[in-house]
Amino acid sequence: MFVRNHARVPVPDTQAQTAKPHLPDAQTVTAVTHWNESLFSFRVTRPQSLRFRSGEFVMIGLLDDRGKPLLRAYSIASPAWDEELEFYSIKVPDGPLTSRLQHIKVGQEIILRPKPVGTLVHDALLPGKRIWFLATGTGIAPFASLMREPETYEKYEQVIMMHTCRTVSELEYGRQLVENLEADPLIGEMVAGKLRYYATTTREASPRMGRITDNLASGKVFADLGLPRMNPAEDRAMVCGSLAFNVDVKAVLESFGLREGANSEPREYVVEKAFVGDGV
């Protein structure tokens, strides 16, 4: 996993064992990485009782000034097999939660409710040949989990990660993760030759630019990657971004003949509706 290749301050075993949680559903922060002035990721201890499917989210947070839990939905960025939990977040200066959460340090505690839910799971899709992960900004978090999940490569011949941000530095988390996957001892061999990474920017100049919707609708991404246009017989998609992004992408996917699915009714694509607002 990429975190082994990035600066990280581990918590000594003795510290982790002797820490006495005082928050409700408390977990201890084990690593924090600030990617730029607006993005950071962190890892925390995993509750022994927590079982989740890669791609799901949980409620995490801190206490507010009144001592009440201030919680938001966060996708788990680490895969289901990881011994710790990883999260990826934006920094919102006046955000109720992220204005506080961005200052957490190793050894501190956060609240984590161990009740995972979400629609970005393999069970919500019908079998297919290719899986498209479509994300903007921190919407890449659930796909950071799914790209490290062996089941992803067992189910699909090709995995395409499309990620769009405003600037190059905002792509760094995903870029490092993808670049280190083939060296991962657990899934490296499964990833090789299957995962395609298509990162673009919308404001700062970069090798590839443009919004996901435009690159899909125009066919540019298919031409660039040498792939056929999406079709319901072969392609499956997962979407995670702002509400406006989700609506626009859904229209494009349905123009290709794909239908929206859910845990209770698997189809060709799914959308994470929890990804809105501060702290998601």
Image (spheres, rainbow, N blue to C red):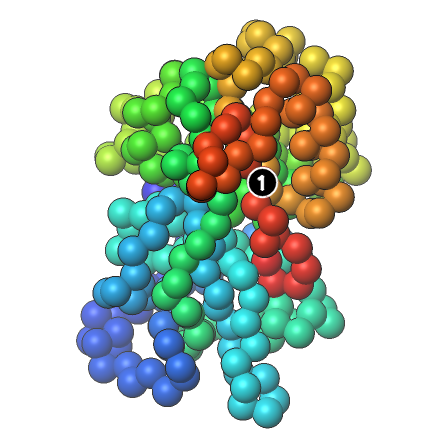
* Residue 69 in view in this figure: yes
Relative to 55, say whether 256 is above or below. Answer: above
Q: Quadrant of the N terminus?
A: top left
In this view of the protein, which residue sits in the foreground, 86 or 168?
A: 86
Relative to 63, say whether 209 is above or below. Answer: above
Q: Amino acid at mark 1?
A: Val
Given the current orientation, which residue lies at the most extreme bottom position?
66
Q: Position of residue 10 (x, y in %)?
A: 32, 64
Q: Position of residue 91 (x, y in %)?
A: 65, 62
**Residue drawn at (44%, 74%) of the image:** 110
- Identify the residue under disc 1: 271
Check disc 1 and report its element: helix, strand or loop: strand
In this view of the protein, which residue sits in the foreground, 224 or 206?
A: 224
Q: Position of residue 14 (x, y in %)?
A: 20, 76
**Residue drawn at (50%, 39%) of the image:** 262
Q: Report the side of 239 relative to 245 (left or right).
A: left
**Residue drawn at (64%, 44%) of the image:** 241
Q: Residues within 10 Å of mark 1 (few under 14, many from 20)?
A: many
Given the current orientation, which residue lies at the most extreme right position?
203
**Residue drawn at (58%, 8%) of the image:** 228
